[in-house]
Image (spheres, grey):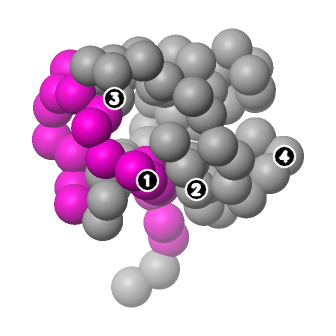
Amino acid sequence: MLIRYFAAARAAAGVSEETVPMPDGASVAEVADVLVERHPELGRVLTRCSYLLDEVAVRDLDAPATGAMLDVLPPFAGG
């Protein structure tokens, strides 16, 4: 699965994107757990993040991460 990081998530991960192998049926929450294992600094950021799975907003983190791309979006300032 391609993971794309934005803003503070990118800074915490130290990369703008990466490919993370995940087993079939893994939830979005399980993907997030793997991301924190890879990048411990993400732990402080992910609690405030929202996610897009193949450009569709994720409302339930227990939902299967069946898409090809997951965007990690921290809150953005501005108007």
Q: Nearer the viewer, residue 25 or 11?
A: 25
* Disc number lying in front (3 or 1): 1
Of labels 2 and 1, earlier in sequence is 2
- Lateral position of residue 60 relative to residue 70, left or right: left
Of labels 2 and 4, earlier in sequence is 2
Circles 1 and 4 in contact, beta carbons < 8 Å: no
Please tell me whether the stretch drawn in magenta is mainly helix, strand or loop.
loop
Kindly report the distance in space between the C-alpha atoms of the residues bearing marks 1 and 4: 18 Å
**What residue is drawn where x is 30% and y is 34%?**
65
Kindly report the distance in space between the C-alpha atoms of the residues bearing marks 2 and 1: 7 Å
Q: Which residues are magenta?
A: 56-77
Kindly report the distance in space between the C-alpha atoms of the residues bearing marks 3 and 2: 14 Å
**What residue is drawn where x is 31% and y is 59%?**
54
Q: Nearer the viewer, residue 24 or 78?
A: 24
The amino acid type of the residue labelled 3 equals: Val
Q: Position of residue 48 (x, y in %)?
A: 44, 38
Of labels 3 and 1, earlier in sequence is 3
Residue 66, visible in the rendered structure: yes
Q: Position of residue 20 (x, y in %)?
A: 61, 34
The amino acid type of the residue labelled 2 equals: Arg
Question: Residue 49: which quarter of the image?
Answer: top left
* Disc number lying in front (2 or 1): 1
The amino acid type of the residue labelled 4 equals: Gly
Question: Residue furthest toward the right?
Answer: 14
User: Counting other residues with Cα less than 10 Å from the Cα at mark 1, is it few (<14), some (14-19), or many (20 or more)?
Assistant: some
Of labels 3 and 2, earlier in sequence is 2
Kindly report the distance in space between the C-alpha atoms of the residues bearing marks 2 and 4: 11 Å
Relative vertical location of residue 39 with respect to residue 71 in this rendering, above or below = above
Kindly report the distance in space between the C-alpha atoms of the residues bearing marks 3 and 1: 11 Å
The residue pinned by badge 4 equals 14
- Magenta-colored stretch includes residue 7: no
